[in-house]
Amino acid sequence: MIALLTIALTFSACKTDKGPTDDTKVESSENVDNKEDKDNKEDKDNKEEAEEVKKLEITEEIKPKMKETTEKVTNLLSERKIDDFKAILSEEFKKATEGQDLDIFSQFEDQLGKFEKFENIDYKTQQGYYITDSVLRFEHGTIDQIVALSEKMEVEGVNYSNLMVDIVADDFEESITVDAGTGFPLKGMLALPKGEVKAAVVIVDGSGPNNMNLTIGKNNPMKHMSDQLVKKGIAVVRFNKRTYDYAKKFAMEGTQNQVLIKDEFIDDAAAALKLVKADNRLKDTDIYLMGHSQSATYLPEINKESGDIAKGYLVIAGTPKNLMEITKMQIDELISQIEKTETKTDEEKKNRDLQIQYTKQSIEANEEILKKLDKMSDEELKKPENAPYGMPGIYAKDLLKHDGFKLYEDNKLPVFVRIGEFDRQVPSTEIKTWEDLIGDRENVDIKELKGVNHLMQASDGKTPIDKLYSSEYQEDKPIDSTLIDDIAAFVEANK
């Protein structure tokens, strides 16, 4: 899925977690008057923290206390005893979480069912704190929990990440492993029609650490996509992204911001194509490569890496433009949305105008970073200030090396493009971009799909762009049947 500004997926409040994550953090604020004072304070704090770390040891006496407190944190939150939970927090952490909705387990249980047990607890020290790193098992999946504790066993922070949904094969599906030989084998699924197999499709998800179902709350759009295509006689392969299956490993190694397009999309999707081709049941079947959102930009490059296995490309809610361009378009729409916001008082108008001003300034600053990326060293690219639109500099620089326009211009295979009328992430105006690029070819089918959103599910187009993930995308709906019919017709027409 194309990233949509900043998406808050889970509650997180661990001041000891310095590494970047995909989660929202709630941290204690610093009141520092100027940069010099801040730098001096940070140097002092770092020295003090380093000294504290040396004093902390995981002893046989300490470990049971860490375990007991961690279990108490988990049980109080899972049982919704929020006041009792607040009672075991440090004063600093209480202030940091003041006004926050701490009923995070409601969100987890919506997706994973009831909390069941701890699958694992690891113990360590970090920056002057005792740390427990737990895997929490729910009915339908797991989530990682990090708890930071003081020497007095007060809770200094809690962080949740790496939510993993269990995906169980239906009777027409087979669990598979997609292995590109890079040391990161991925979980996948092959869905087979009961009768004649008319074609096969390999689905490649868009941006972000997505699982094979593109799970968002209770919504599983790529599972719906697969199920509906199978009913049309089309076999489907879908697989977890590397950034999903190995999110924790990358975070622990500090390498999550060094993933490039080759790692995120190309190698694994090419391996999935080879897997289908090697299956005796499908080796003589026409195989199509489907890209949803960002991955659609790279379909010709993926196919080339596979040895040109794919018969054609199915672009779903995608564009040849790169992620930075699309993100800027999304922010422009957000500005337009803010500008239309009604204000009743001068103060409200002032706040709205300031929000617009700051957002526009943010765009300008990000565009300036983009202009300089090509000349930056790897060390400069790793700096937080050199992350255009929130994307790691190394990743953003790599994005600019892959020209989606040239990829499709040079590749003459059949191309199917559908963008939803109410897609707020890749707007339907991108239809013209595709038409100008490849619209004059006979084996191309480019259309806007009426009444659907970025997930190809029914929409009235009224949800604000900054509320999509928290509301509309949470609704579990089938894929629009017109899209499925059109794909089946396209495959048949290109036999």
Image: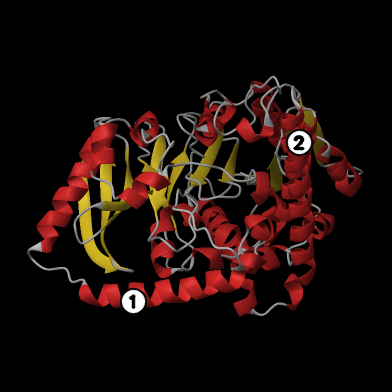
Instruction: Please tell me the numbered disc located at residue 350.
Output: 2
| Residue located at (74% from left, 25% from top) | 345
Q: Residue furthest front?
A: 33
User: Could you tell me if the residues under marks 2 and 1 are in contact, i.e. CB atoms within 8 Å?
Assistant: no
Q: Look at label 1 and name its amino acid.
A: Ala
SS assignment at label 1: helix
**What whole-number distance in Å separates the C-alpha atoms at marks 2 and 1?**
45 Å
| Residue located at (61% from left, 63% from top) | 392
312 is higher (above) or lower (below) than 265: above
Residue 459, horizontal then vertical, whole percent: 66, 22
Which residue position holds label 1? 50
The answer to whether any part of residue 86 appears in the image is: yes
149 is higher (above) or lower (below) than 341: below
Q: Residue furthest top?
A: 460
399 is higher (above) or lower (below) than 74: below
SS assignment at label 2: helix
The answer to whether any part of residue 382 appears in the image is: no
Task: Locate residue 324 relative to residue 196 in the image: left or right.
Answer: right
59 is higher (above) or lower (below) than 270: below
Residue 195, horizontal then vertical, whole percent: 50, 29
From the image, state whether disc 2 or disc 1 is nearer to you. Answer: 2
Task: Locate residue 129 relative to residue 453 in the image: left or right.
Answer: left
Q: Look at label 2 and name its amino acid.
A: Lys
* Front residue of 453 and 101: 101
Quarter of the picture holding the C terminus? top right
